[in-house]
Image: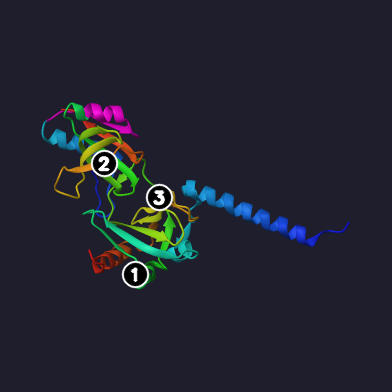
Amino acid sequence: MRVNKKLLILIFCMLISLGTMVSCQNEGQADDMFPQSTTLNSLLSSYTINKISITDGNTGEVRQTSDSAEIEQLLKILADEKFIRNDNNKKGTRAGYSYFIDFYFQNIQGYYRYTLACGFTKSDNFSGCIPTGNCNAENENAVKEAVKDFYNSLKS
Amino acid sequence: MKTAAGIGTWSTDVIPGLEKYASSRNVSTPISDYEGRNVNELTDYLYHDRPIIIFVNKDPKYGDHAILAVGFQDTSDGKYIRVADGWSKTFSNFYKDSAYITNQITVWW
């Protein structure tokens, strides 16, 4: 029997696409899809960030930037920090945090949020495909200080 | 309430904290936690001049935060809750009733 190679390749590609789509849909809903350990670099590698907004949890003041050099500076600070999945969260809801950072991407609806010492979430019908979940940075205090310095360097 | 700087307070630690405070003032008061959002209870409490602690989660503006509801208003656009949010010194903050509400903690005295 002669096999049509082109047809086989086409079916193979379709199966891979379907698998990726299903995987993305699940990622948006299930926190357990968050990797055991990852970096911001690998989470955001396929996306172009065009705006960053940081909210100070103590005052509610929001500072934001669309300047590519400033965005690059923050990414450089956080790029290699390891985020380790936290499955042992206490029952209930937590209130309070030092800062959260909202990442806005080119051609993507909504935003991806990192709340320090808490984890990653997505909001406003985020149309991207990035895992969400509770996690802790390996160097939580260092991250907090770095984000605080960066926040203070932004114009209010 | 086991509040930790930069990490916050768990809703499950709020009631023991409030009870401890009430006890230190020799006051016995029922405190209850409703997990989820119950708009009828919320507005009923506010209607009787009882403030109510609201926990919001993943809220676009507040993130994971606790706010104190002190009043409400029905509008054609839905219910707006007047809140003290701890971020400003005014009570003139209005929070639109939403699915981001995860807990309501009531104190009756």
Direction from residue A44 to residue B34 in the image, left or right: left
Q: Which residue is mark 1?
A: A67
Same chain shared by disc 2 and disc 1? no
Direction from residue B79 to residue A25 in the image, left or right: right
Identified by mark 1, the residue type is Asp
Closer to us: B44 or A145: B44
Extreme residue in the left direction: B25
Direction from residue A109 to residue A150 in the image, left or right: left
Determine the chain carrying the residue at label 1: A
Q: Nearer the viewer, mark 1 or mark 3?
A: 1
Relative height, residue B93 to residue B26 (above, below): below
Please indicate, yes or no, whether residue A30 appears anywhere in the rendered image.
no
Q: Which residue is mark 2?
A: B95
Residue range corresponding to the magenta coloring: B27-45
**Mark-to-mark CA distance, 1 and 3:** 22 Å
User: In the image, residue A134 lies at what x, y percent?
Assistant: 41, 51
Q: Looking at the image, which residue is at 76% across and 61% down?
A: A6
Q: How is the image coloured?
A: rainbow
Q: Which residue is mark 3?
A: A123
User: In the image, residue A120 lies at what x, y percent?
Assistant: 40, 54
User: In the image, residue A7 lies at what x, y percent?
Assistant: 76, 58
Location of the N terminus of chain A (image quadrant): bottom right
